[in-house]
Amino acid sequence: MQKNWRALTDPGVYLFHVEGRPRLQEVSVNRYRLSVEGGLDRQQDRHAFTQSAAYWLDQEHGTPVGGSGEMHVISMTELSRTVTAKDHEVTPEKVGERTLSPSDPGERAQIKGLIQSSLRRAIPDSRYSFQFLDEVVRRDIEFGGGESDFGARRKHSLKIHITADGVVLLQVRVGYSLATMSSLDEMVTAGKELPSWRVEHNSEVYSNSGTGQLAGWSDLHYNDWSDSLGEVISEYQEGVMKEEVRKELIEQNPRLVEVDYGGFTGDQAPRALTLSPRTEQVKEQDWDFHDQFTTRRAMEPDERFELVADFVDDLATLPGLDIDFESSPSNYGFEYVNMREGQSRLIYGDGNHASKPSTGLKRHGVYSPPGEYRVGVLYPSDFEEIHQDLIGLIAKTLAQWEAPAGTSGYSYELGSLSEYGDIYQQLRDDTDVVVALVPDKGAADDFPGVEDPYDELKRTLMRKNIPTQMLQKSTAQRVINMSRKGASDELVNTLSAVVAKAGGTPWQIDELPGETQAFMGLDVTRDQETGQHSGASASIVMRDGSTFAAESTTQQAGEKFVSDQVAKFVRDLVFDFADERDEPLERLTVFRDGKVHEDIEAVREGLDALDAEIDIVGVRKRGQSRVAEFDGREFRIADKGIGFVDSDRDQAIVHAFGKPEIDDDNHVGTPRTFRLVKDSGPTDIETLARQSFWLSEVHYGSPARSTRLPVPIKYADAAAKYVSDGYIDPGRVIRGPAYL
């Protein structure tokens, strides 16, 4: 493994990838069918079962094993032994031999599985513990411990990418994992009241895993008979409790604690438990360590890549493949793209340009005002003084932006939810949007008979087709106090959304690359417990970035989900878009939130009614490669609006958030990126990447700080939350950006 990556790295912008050598040519493998004794249930997930079987065959045979379609695996050596996977006996039966090429996408995916299997064997067990590659934890405590009950270990999440010409790239995401330094018996005193802590089994002394909530002291001691177990507790734990510790507990016979495991309550020795290291519990127990952990976790680019290089240097040669990873950053397989090209495509009042929306609004005003419109300002009667300053500031700022509005103030009394339901009756009939002043979150709890008006006001007014912009008391006070120096970022964000909700266009994109006329953001929601579809949402954004409409639905009985949902969005949103523009829709891009291959056939079926050319693109938000600029000495935060394109694999990584909005002194860590994966369509991946960046620059609710995601996706998410929060009924079309 190479050292001194800094000396070997030229200045430039880099992906946080490292490169494996030598390059793969063709890989010869044996292919096996998985024979399951007794067969699988019809409901069993075949893909998940295949992955599990591959893992256990790897463990049993000591050789890399990967998936090869449902119920088939591949290996570079012979497999013969039966293993247990998901409570089933599985035997590999050889069905043939194959040669896989990385130039073929399907075969490349199979090679990836083999490399992942081999990578697990290259991680030194003496230094790291892990079950899966998405959480490889260094055994040493990095910081904490000592007088603190908590510590932190380095955590790594690994992904393998293979270029079309066979170069293996390793993406290492680094962070910190919380660790508990003390067992529960060191933190509590027998007989004294127990806090309602979240606890887990201490893996250093107890082999059975488990997590639960402390429920109090038990009446039992360690050497007592347990009716629920049907034997003496100390005898029951023979073989699962570390024998040395078990003998100590038999001698001490400590009182046990009750643990609520969710489905049952069990008795457990405090020595066998540790605090479950969740950030909220750490914050409650040890504020100083929590503050240190939070600060250290937000790593700047140079520290982040230094930890990547440290991990790569620890890796052995990949067994069976003889690949070594070099610890220098690599952009291999990707072409660097500057999407801003030294200019801004964002235009404001009188066609003026500015690179930052908040600057453009302050200097040039809005691109297109709503015309004649009225802003109502609702405020609790106790906030009269704040209201007087606020309503004047709103009117003054909107006038400065060349979007003057009529303004009217209306007081209301804080009370029960039922008392907020008819407040809308005070408003003038020509009210277009409401700024609602409300108490800070949680403040209403301090007053008997007073309930927080936030949700009820928003819900009631939306059902009367009046969009709202909510403003908490402390925010309003801060906005007023800062107004002496000019409009604050919070005021700019608020009033930009007000203009958009009233029908205006705060700013827009001038000459977006490509021929796409409209963009649909599509988000399909799954129930976290069952994994089943539970809803979908979509937004339509025009090529200039302005918002058209959005809709969110829940699954109805008898629906052919997801295709029925997409077909409904096409009817309600896309056709209406074409009608209002009075022109045929000939080019549409669908941004699918998540992995594009999920539900892809259903998405295509839902789009059947459209006589248009359609690009379908996946937008992956989480866990993507970081990007930073190396100046010859260290990594620094890179400019926003840059990206890396792999045309051979139709993928791009977009760095949409960075300098100049943030800099190296802001200590916000390393900005995240998103990945585009093109499934189909006429537009090339570089143009799609450029479009997605500029669409991340038109979030009308956040001109002070642009979102890192294209707004069709951002707005689809927001519409879904708007429905789930009960502000609007499922299936109702939301015109404009009311959900901001």
Image (cartoon, helix red, strand yellow):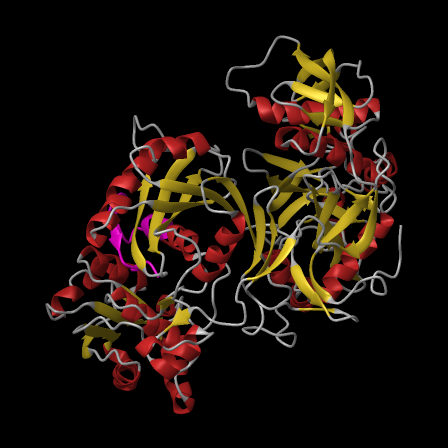
Q: Which residues are magenta?
A: 719-740
> Is residue 732 shown in magenta?
yes
Instruction: List the single residue furthest toward the left.
Output: 429
Q: Is residue 113 visible?
A: yes
Vertical side of 120 occupied by 213: above or below: below
Q: Is residue 144 visible?
A: no
> Is residue 444 shown in magenta?
no
Q: Is residue 279 left or right of residue 483?
A: right
Please state the horizontal and vertical placement of residue 463, each as a whole percent of the image.
20, 55
Vertical side of 373 occupied by 401: above or below: below
Please state the horizontal and vertical placement of residue 545, each as a whole percent of the image.
37, 60
Q: Is residue 499 left or right of residue 524?
A: left
Q: Write the residue at 35% across / 74% down.
A: 348
Q: Using the rendered view, name the quadrant where residue 248 is placed.
A: top right
Front-most of residues 193 and 212 = 212
Q: Write the residue at 78% across / 58% down.
A: 307
Q: Is residue 710 left or right of residue 259?
A: left
Front-most of residues 114 and 526 = 114
Query: Dividing the image into 4 quarters, which one contains the C terminus?
Result: bottom left
Q: Is residue 510 left or right of residue 671?
A: left
Front-most of residues 174 and 200 = 174
Please state the horizontal and vertical placement of residue 518, each as a whole percent of the image.
34, 51
